[in-house]
Amino acid sequence: MKKYFLYTVLIMISLLGTDLTDFALSIWVLDQPGNTIKSYAIIWFFEAAPGVFLAPFIGSFVDRWSKKKMIIYGQLVAGIGSILLMLLHFSGVLLPWHIMTISGIGSIASMVVYSAFYVATTALVSKDKLMKAQGISTSIYAAIGMGVPILAPVLYKLIGLSSIFFIDAVTFLVSIIAFLIVRFVVVPNSEEQFSMRNDLKVVKSFLQKRKGILRLFIFFFIGNFLVGLVQVLFTPLILDFSNEYVLGAVLSVVSIGAVIGGVVMSSTKSFKKPIRTILFINSIIGGILSCLWIDVNPYVLALGGMSIVLLFTVIEVVNDAFFQTVVPAKMLGRLSGFEGLIVGGAAPLSFLFSGFLVDYLKELLKYFSEEQLTHFPGTGVTISIMMVFIISGVFLIVVSFLFSRSESIKLLDTLFKTEIKEQKHKKHEKSPKKDTKIKEATPSDVF
């Protein structure tokens, strides 16, 4: 657990700079003359889509290559991207398409880093402690999420976007140097030659034996699409009737939910029925989204967002622990890559769709009188976005209920319980025979 904590902190250092940049860029893009929700959403699409669509290839490489090198190289590419954005902005020529291109490459680099660390976690933490480990890393990331929305607008006004890019590059550099120095855990690599066709066969064979996992992927795709609509529209919603300082305060409160969720999960050993828990929590999230329209103001949105993020944090931790438990370590990268394409593809698609949906709903508002729309603050943008929230919430409730009735999905809880029992049995068998001699480190123990 100590090594896991160290590696997590190093990656979170680079994440701090990335989050500062993303937040500042969101403000900068929305401040540009002639900007629309549609153009803002398209940028979000290009920031997420490349890494998602290449996830199967990345997962195949992760199963075969040095995890340490992939983490270092991925952060190096992302850091170079931040430097390029800084130079473009400093020269006064930064344009939205620059952000789309460089951020797209950065999303690929980030996918490499997180996929490598995700697989390495199975060698750092035993299966019965995976949920606790995920809770710890989530708490650290959530703490960053609390500070960034407050810090980023202040830095944006005081030192400018170029200086924030510089901070981002420095955080990447610190993390890279640290990973070059520290010893890394040994992670089993697949000895199979690289072949996407064979990898797809391996994944297909695994999913055929466990049909519930594929159906779970379908559920996550739908759920992530619906939540993605809310995620991308939250910032323009607040800015439509307020300013960036209120936005920062609201997002900081929202991030408290992730801190609470992470702390709770770090002290939770496991769930007997993780998949049923995930489906139930998703239905609660849908209920909260459906009710936010009752009183639209920063306080309600902050508390509602905090509750949603808290619940979503629990879902992410439980989901990660589930897959790290039931999937063999040597093929975890490939399966997570497949999951990244199927499930992860929902978010960029929702980002792309959200702008068009808001514009369409704004056109429908022309048929309503002004008296009927006075319940909401701001402009037609706020009303349109709240309509999206309601639609997403209702659909999430319905979908969660329908999938909870699937027998193959119910069997996944049994699979999880079996794997945990086998892990404990193996530990019990090995413990009496444990060699008390201290083994000296050899070159094969490190990357």
Image: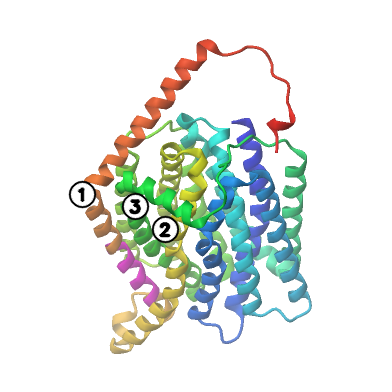
Please indicate, yes or no, whether residue 205 appears anywhere in the rendered image.
yes
Give the structural element (helix, strand or loop) at label 3.
Answer: helix
- Kindly report the secondary structure that dominates the magenta region of the rendered protein: helix
Give the structural element (helix, strand or loop) at label 1.
Answer: loop
> Disc 1 marks which amino acid?
Arg
Question: Which of the marked residues, 2 or 1, is nearer the chain's N terminus?
Answer: 2
Place of residue 90 in the rendered image (x, y in percent of width and height, measured from the top left)? 78, 75
Q: Relative to 417, is 433 on the left or the right?
A: right
| CA–CA distance in space, label 1 to label 3 | 15 Å
State which quarter of the image contains the N terminus: top right
Question: At 76% across and 63% down in the image, what residue appears?
Answer: 166
Q: Is residue 370 shown above or below 294?
A: below
- Please tell me the numbered disc located at residue 405: 1
Q: Relative to 370, is 98 on the left or the right?
A: right
Q: Relative to 351, is 210 on the left or the right?
A: left
State which quarter of the image contains the C terminus: top right
Region in magenta:
384-394
- Please tell me the numbered disc located at residue 343: 2
Pointer 3 residue: 214
Question: At 38% across and 45% down in the image, what residue appears?
Answer: 206
Nearer the observer, 34 or 415: 415
Q: Are marks 3 and 2 in contact (CB under 8 Å)?
A: no
Question: Which of the marked residues, 3 or 2, is nearer the chain's N terminus?
Answer: 3
- Residue 83 falls in which quadrant of the image? bottom right
Question: Which of the marked residues, 1 or 3, is nearer the chain's N terminus?
Answer: 3
| CA–CA distance in space, label 2 to label 1 | 20 Å
